Image (cartoon, rainbow, N blue to C red):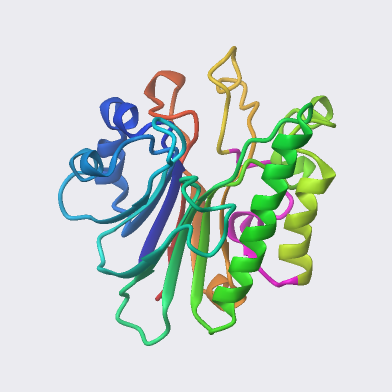
């Protein structure tokens, strides 16, 4: 069994200070993918604790973005931005090949899409270009027959069920038809599987992000914007997908909650 978790830590130093390491000890993931790391390479291993193999794509702008894959199993290879200008030096994409003991290559991706801004054509152009690059890269990786777990904070609620206040967010970045079209293409045309939605096809949520403002967390007024997306063969081996929502507002160590899936490999 391989347990994979993904979470936007909203700054690894703050998350570690607030309780992330206790969550890691309790949940025991084999692989955890992190977004918004916002810490230099030399600090990450110490913040994560002992026993992790770690690869990290740092943003060229200090204190911004940053994605990482931490694995209890050896990482045999990794790649970040060399295949796309939308990824290079942005701290928004890293791939890690995990040594599972199986013949088929097992690649885990930690991704962090741009937030976007519906009032800024330039920011939306950048966001959609990132999704174009992600789609192309996923196709390249899948063509050689490997297993792929595409994880991260993708900053898009795909359906009305993925956002509590969907009516109030019509026309807003994160809930725009042109963003959702990529997810339609992935799931309906290209055969990728949203593991959590496949397990809860008719449910609202489970949400993975809540604003720190107001009573969003207490009222479960959240967004489901953190994903584990896999190839169809691996989807058949996915078990017990869940969102590890904190029990209370004051026990949160990020504004996101981890998305956790077990894979029977």
Residue 48 appearing in the image: yes
**Residue displayed at 57% across by 51% down:** 227
Where residue 183 sits, quadrant-wise, is bottom right
**Who's the residue at 78% across and 31% down the image?**
118
Give coordinates of residue 87: x percent, y percent.
54, 53
Q: Residue furthest bottom?
A: 103
Q: Is residue 104 above or below residue 34?
A: below
Q: Is residue 1 in sight in this rendering? A: no
Residue at figure coordinates x 59%, y 67% from the top left: 137
Q: Position of residue 197 (x, y in %)?
A: 65, 55
Q: Quadrant of the N terminus?
A: bottom left
Whole-percent x and y of residue 60?
A: 42, 40
Report the side of 137 relative to 132 (left or right).
left
| Count of numbered marks | 0
Q: Does residue 148 lie above or below 251 as drawn?
A: below
> Is 55 positioned to the left or the right of 248 in the image?
left
Snapshot quadrant of residue 116:
top right
Q: Position of residue 209 (x, y in %)?
A: 56, 33
Magenta segment boundaries in residue numbering: 190-207
Residue at the limit of the structure toward the left, as seen here: 50
Reply yes or no: does residue 94 show up in magenta.
Answer: no
Query: Which one is nearer the viewer's eye here, 119 or 259?
Result: 119
- 200 falls in the magenta region: yes
The secondary structure making up most of the magenta span is loop
In the rendered image, the quadrant that contains the C terminus is bottom left
> As drawn, is 221 to the left or to the right of 145?
right
In the figure, 219 relative to 238: above or below? above
Depth check, front residue: 4 or 27 = 4
């Amino acid at each position: 069994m391989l347990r994979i978790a993904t979470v936007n830590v909203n700054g690894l130093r703050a998350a570690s200070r607030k309780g992330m390491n206790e969550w890691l000890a309790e949940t025991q993931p084999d692989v955890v993918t992190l977004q918004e790391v916002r810490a230099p390479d030399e600090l990450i291993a110490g913040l994560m604790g002992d026993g992790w193999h770690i690869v990290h794509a740092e943003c060229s702008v200090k204190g911004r973005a940053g994605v990482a894959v931490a694995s209890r199993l050896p990482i045999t290879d990794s790649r970040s931005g060399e295949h796309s200008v939308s990824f290079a030096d942005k701290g928004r994409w890293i791939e890690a090949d995990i040594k599972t003991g199986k013949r088929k290559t097992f690649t885990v991706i930690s991704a962090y899409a741009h937030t976007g801004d519906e009032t800024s054509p330039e920011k939306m152009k950048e966001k959609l270009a990132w999704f174009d690059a992600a789609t192309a890269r996923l196709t390249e990786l899948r063509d050689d027959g490997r297993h792929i777990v595409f994880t991260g904070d993708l900053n898009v609620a795909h359906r009305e069920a993925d956002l509590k206040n969907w009516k109030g967010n019509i026309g807003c970045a994160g809930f725009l038809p042109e963003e959702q079209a990529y997810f339609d293409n992935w799931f309906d045309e290209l055969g990728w599987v949203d593991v959590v939605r496949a397990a809860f096809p008719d449910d609202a949520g489970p949400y993975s992000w809540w604003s720190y403002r107001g009573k969003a967390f207490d009222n479960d007024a959240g967004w489901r914007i953190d994903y584990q997306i896999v190839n169809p063969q691996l989807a058949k081996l996915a078990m017990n997908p869940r969102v590890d929502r904190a029990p209370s507002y004051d026990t949160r160590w990020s504004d996101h909650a981890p998305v956790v899936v077990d894979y029977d490999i």
